[in-house]
Image (tube, rainbow, N blue to C red):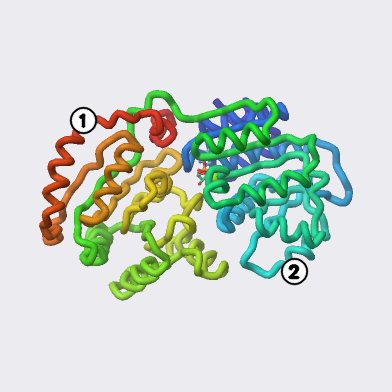
Amino acid sequence: MSFKKLGLSDSLLKAIDKKGYSKPSLIQEKAIPAILEKKDVLASAQTGTGKTAGFTLPLLQILSHGQKYRRRPIRALILTPTRELAAQIQDNVIAYSEFEDLRSMVIFGGVNANPQIRALKNGVDILVATPGRLLDLHNQKALSLKTVEILVLDEADRMLDMGFQRDLNKILSVLPIKRQNLLFSATFSKEIKKLANKILKNPVSVEATPENTTAEKVNQKIYRVDQKKKSELIIKLISEGNWKQVLVFTRTKHGANRLSKKMVASDITAAAIHGNKSQGARTKALKGFKDGSVRVLVATDIAARGLDIPLLPHVVNFELPNVSEDYVHRIGRTGRAGASGEAISLVSQEEMTYVKGIEKLIGEQLKSEIVDGFEPTMTASNNARTSANQKNSRKPKSKRNTRNYKRSSKR
Ligand code: ADP
Ligand code: MG
């Protein structure tokens, strides 16, 4: 399958070519034709499968070929939960629309609203926004949503997780009733289906999770280690393994700062990214990581969710998340767009209960190793785990939830 066969225009094909994509991903192959037919679409595919281009390319084509308005009212609204995601989507929109006569803009909170308000006055065809700032500017009458033809909800599952339901409802209430709706999500949860039922009209559902997922692209393993020895271990892994770039997850903002400082003290360039950092600091850290000047990015879940960091070979869980789904999202940062990757979790005795939940969710057991010199101190509950381990060595029964989380083998 080629992008051309999907019915995209020559100017878009040129932009795709410039991006270096040779063929569409599975979700793009399925979603693009349906969107071009102006259908409502519910699309689910795991992280890193190219959902952004999946909605942006057809959206640009529809707007380019639609009626032109001199004053550029907002014709497409792309909503996404975090500032970083909004900025990334905008980067994509800019790249793909290089040869189109379309203007786009991104708005999000945490930065001064005045430049955004001024820029909106010049008119934009495509607005990428986080819900809070969008409502804020709408309330100030800095923008109107009456002319929106296409609504995109990206990372809709995260949007619900982060409590944006009420903001969403408000936004929906000021949009025109007749519009095209596109809902993109990494998972197809009950909540997502409920949201879809409310927003979408006769949607085409597309899912890009192949039934047979034999080849796992991400090599996952855990290292058992005492909490207080974790920093030393991760520094050893990075230096001795000669890892060029690694994304590290910590459970707390404070922990992210502390670890990144320790790395720097060991001559490993590192930066922390989390909710307490200013927008400028976050952007700078991400940029440094992308251009390679920062070797280790230490992040909390919220900050890292959805970040597009291409071809990242290593992801480390410095601490396991207490929500198993977050584990899946974290390891989705490695092995992106067909490349393979390694996800390592440093697991202390206290965290062993999380391992069980994760194994149940992903439907497989995680390989467990101990590094010489980092043996965990034996405790009574350690022995308890050994027997629990044996009891659990059968394949977990629950396969139902795992489908969306398996890595694609078809790409
Ligand atoms: P998702 O939203 O599904 O998590 P993204 O849209 O962020 O995924 O895309 C993940 C990565 O894959 C990005 O670096 C993007 O540039 C790249 N990508 C997207 N489509 C293709 C394609 N058809 N071929 C190769 N790489 C692609
Ligand atoms: Mg995405």
Q: For the point 32% across and 53% down, which residue is it?
A: 320
Quarter occupied by residue 17:
top right
Q: What residue type is labelled 1?
A: Arg
Res 394 label:
1
Residue 251 in the image: above or below residue 30: below
- In the displayed structure, 201 sits above or below 261; it is above
Residue at (15, 52) in percent of width and height: 381
Furthest residue toward right: 70
Q: Residue 223: where, in percent of width, then height?
A: 21, 52
Q: Residues within 10 Å of mark 1 (few under 14, many from 20)?
A: few
Tag on residue 317? none
Could you tell whether 203 is left or right of 374 in the image? right
Secondary structure, mark 2, is helix
Query: Which residue position holds label 2?
Result: 114
Task: Name the secondary structure under disc 1.
Answer: loop
Q: CA–CA distance between discs 2 and 1?
A: 59 Å
Which corner quadrant of the image does residue 360 belong to? top left
Question: Image point 66% across, 47% down: which residue?
Answer: 168
Q: Which of 258 and 336 is in front in this view?
A: 258
Amino acid on which disc 2 is placed: Asn
Q: Where is residue 409 in the image (x, y as percent from the top left)?
A: 39, 30
Query: Which tag is nearer the camera, tag 2 or tag 1?
Result: 1
Q: Is residue 275 left or right of residue 69?
A: left
Q: Position of residue 383 (x, y in %)?
A: 11, 49
Q: In which quarter of the image is residue 270?
A: bottom left
Q: In the image, 69: left or right of 138? A: right
Instruction: Using the image as rendered, state which of residue 383 and residue 115 is in the foreground.
Output: 383
In this rendering, position of residue 59 left or right of residue 145: left
Judge whether 72 appears above or below 33 on screen. below
In the image, residue 380 sits, relative to residue 387, either above or below, namely below
